[in-house]
Amino acid sequence: MKTIAIRLAALCLLLAPLAALQAGDDGPIVGAIRWDGWYGDVTVTKAVEASLGQPKYHFRLPWFAVVMGDGKVQINGDSQAIMDDEIAYAAQAGLNYWSVVDYLDEAPGMSIAMNRYLAAKDKKGIHYCLVEEGARLDKAGTKAWGRLVEHFRQPDYQTVLDGRPLLCLFGKTTELGRAEWDELKQQTIAAGLKAPYLVLMDWRKPEAGRLSLGFDAVSRYAASGKGYTADPKSYAELTSFDVRRQLWDQWKQDGTPCITFATAGWDTRPRQERPPVWCKDLVKVAMPDPTPPALQKPLIDATTATPEELTAHIREAIEWTKANRDINPANAIIIYAWNEHDEGGWLQPTRGADEKADDSRIHALGKALRALQSLRNAKP
């Protein structure tokens, strides 16, 4: 009897964490990356206006864009009303947070949307975290830490694991090493907060980079298929191979700490035809379409996710996260992207053929996330 009792006690100890997880787990938090090149009369906005100016790409325009005719468009979402609408759409979709690509002080135009978000009176429960770029932080050095800590203090900053501020790094730092990142943790704790939860988004050997910098997890910014190309993969192939097999299956096999990555697509053809200046190393030769604007048809093919495909993929990401909490303790998902319209991943409503907002992807995301929201709302 004594042996049986000992074994039962041991079994209870093993099952206790799982039982606690099942009892207290209300599903993963879900966020989407923001790349805010759509606001203000600035250089970046002019470049994306050119990329999406051809009529065949107008279905990918943000809903607030204006078609001028003759292959030209105007995009400027710089108003509080538009940001309030974006927040409402994100809440309708069931998102928990946006991961905002931060440019520090290098490109003020890229902070317009974040400033509008911070000024919003009703954020409807939509939080935010930052995505910092490694090369930019290497230039700024540890003087950037104070600015990050101030963001961490914000009541709407996204946290995980009972209060740890979530911070993503796109591309490993080479000048800032583990000691410098430990200093950020120390400054955050000194400010009365918990240590940040650091996530490395890197294309090459992310796990080695995570370990060298002392980060908590890995994820990805995007799944790029064949890279910058005029012949992109279908959405089905992108999600099944580049996401499920190359990321999820590999992370599970290796036991890699991660935040689940999901994607709304990848299709850089607008940038292949009219490349922005920042893509000069990715697009060697521009390939403009000679078809007159009046004769162009919307370029919608298997590369463009259908709402049904998007719903299925996000549901799969949720189920994968639930089944792999041992390697995703933060219980989080990040989606590429809210508004990478000209690079091929977007959730934000677009300009419909009737000139009204096409929010089909908002509804598709809502179908996948509605059960999570219902579960959270039912909690006492």
Image (cartoon, grey):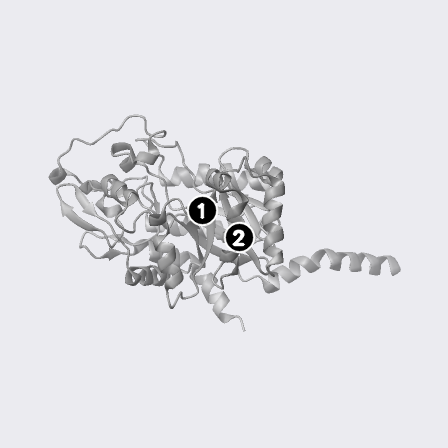
> Outermost residue, right direction?
2
Along the viewing direction, whichever of 102 and 63 lies nearer the viewer: 102
Give the residue drawn at x 51%, y 33%: 204
Label 2 packing within 10 angstroms: few (<14), some (14-19), many (20+): some
Q: In terms of sequence position, does the residue under pointer 2 or pointer 1 come before the other?
A: 2
Depth check, mark 2 against mark 1: the one in front is: 2
Query: Can residue 155 be seen here?
Result: yes
Give the residue drawn at x 47%, y 62%: 156
Quadrant of the image for the N terminus?
Answer: bottom right
Labelled disc at residue 249 = none
Query: Can residue 90 be seen here?
Result: no
Count of marks placed on residues:
2
Residue placed under numbered mark 1 in the picture? 262
Quadrant of the image for the C terminus?
Answer: bottom right
Along the viewing direction, whichever of 287 and 323 lies nearer the viewer: 287
Q: Position of residue 90 (x, y in %)?
A: 37, 59
Q: Position of residue 365 (x, y in %)?
A: 38, 55
Residue placed under numbered mark 2 in the picture? 146
Give the residue drawn at x 54%, y 35%: 174
Instruction: Decide if residue 84 is on the left or right side of residue 157.
Output: left
**SS state under label 1:** strand
Q: Is residue 259 above or below residue 92?
A: above
